[in-house]
Amino acid sequence: MKPCWWTVVLLAVTTVALCSPLINELEPGQEWPKRGSVKQPQDESEDEDTLTEETPPSHPEAEILGEIKEEISSLARAAENADTKVDYSGAQLWKVSTEKTGVRATLGRLRRRNLISTWAGNQTYMDILVKQTAVQNVTRVMKRENITYDIIIEDLQKRINEENPPLDENEVELQDRRGHRMTWKQYHRLEDIHGFMDYLAKTYPKIVSVNTIGKSYEERDLKVLRISDGKPTNKAVFIDGGFHAREWISPATVTYIINQIAENFDEESDDIKNIDWYILPVVNPDGYEYTHVKDRLWRKNRRPGIGRQCVGADLNRNFGYRWGGKGASSNPCSDIYRGSRPFSEPESRAIAEFIKTSTANFSAYLTFHSYGQYLLYPWGYDTVAPPDHKDLDIVGKKIAAAIETTGGSKFTVGCSSKLLYPASGGSDDWAKGQGIKYTYTIELGDTGRYGFVLPTTFIEPVAREALAGIRVLASEIHKL
Ligand code: 0X9
Ligand code: ZN
């Protein structure tokens, strides 16, 4: 059946009419409101003037076309969701010691034959997912080559099924009363995360604003939330999460940090209050949604391949600093595919554009990933360290100490290419290349017991520790 265009157009027009922007919800590319200039909800009479002044002239045709495009991609998404989810029954997580010579080469061969995929690793071990159909075969190879390993998860699907149970009745009731649906007792869909950000902007318009800095490949918003008291002397910190779709603990932690700073701003320390916080909780919204509806273990974004090529680029290999070097693949089917050129992906491009054009004075860039419990500083592209690596190491160790005091987790601090592996095109290297002093990739918990499929009971303890780390970073920034 042909799509009925006028229904779509009508729908689009209605949507545009109904969705007038919030006071401090900005258009893509529009600068943040001048510090202290944002109107309060009680100043209703003045709101209209502010809106007409600050809203750029609208282009109805472009808007309608945009809406139609959105409608079509949402239909495509619905079709995608109608299929069944990827089933990981019988798939296993193994921890393999890689210290013996030849082990890495063997794992590389198994990966190329599509029998295993890599979850995490450093100089001494590798966590691999062994596909259900390959368990026997891979077991035989390991025996033959005398490679030692532990089976960490016997049945991944079982863990996936238990990972994110529904909220209990009391929590659901609370959700309904609060004005947003976000909790830190569950992993939430993008809609809840964005709803939470908009809620904060509406509730605390003096200090919180939300700006859509671009769109993902599938046209989802890339929403950055700013928390700032507007002091012109403030330094700024950029925090992001959700680069890699399956690392669910990352957006959960980043939103926890947002919640703490925004909801308790007045009681917060001066160290926290005298910083402008720019926070993008989900860098890869298409991938994130895909892990909820289709494949729990997807990593990359969702750009379709050309012809019969594979889907997706690794956004953390797509940044334009030493792009295409070590630890990044030119094969679109690889989980570490670098993309067709530096910043080929809209998600990485949006971050770079935003940071480059912002008037904020960024002193730190934190990007939250999982897992392994590492605090990593540049360079990632090769085993070299930046000139101020000692400062990064000292502050990193202070952050790790605060994390351990708060919740007991031990984080290993070091230069990313040396501690983990060289990997080029990362956002951290690019940020450091822009001159942002304290640039870290934080690999949250755990250390491999559950890996990416971390039960929801871990969210609060992991996030509380991360917040303690942020407080230390804030105090160090003020010493600069
Ligand atoms: O490989 C990555 O992208 C990060 N680890 S993860 O397991 N979350 O995928 C580490 C990135 C470290 N930074 C650079 N290599 N630039
Ligand atoms: Zn990651």
Image: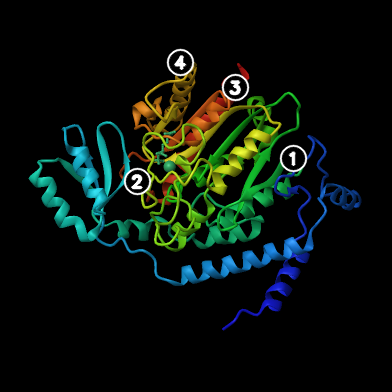
Q: Are marks 3 and 1 in contact (CB under 8 Å)?
A: no
In the foreground, 400 or 56: 56
| Helix, strand or loop for disc 3 | helix
Q: Which residue is mark 4?
A: 390
What residue is shown at x 52% (from left), y 66% (from top)? 77
In the image, residue 384 above or below residue 208 = above
Residue where numbered disc 1 is placed: 32
Q: Is residue 309 above or below residue 264?
A: below
Which amino acid type is marked by label 4? Lys
Disc 1 Cβ-to-ligand 2 distance below 8 Å: no
Instruction: State the image coordinates of residue 3 (x, y, percent, origin top left).
Output: 61, 79
| Label 3, label 1: how far apart the Cα atoms are | 23 Å
N-terminal label among 3 and 1: 1
Residue 210 place in picture, x, y as percent: 69, 46
In the rendered image, the residue lying farthest to the front is 307
Q: Is residue 275 above or below residue 58?
A: above
In the displayed structure image, the side of residue 373 where residue 67 appears, left or right: right
Going 76% across and 26% down the picture, which residue do you hit?
232
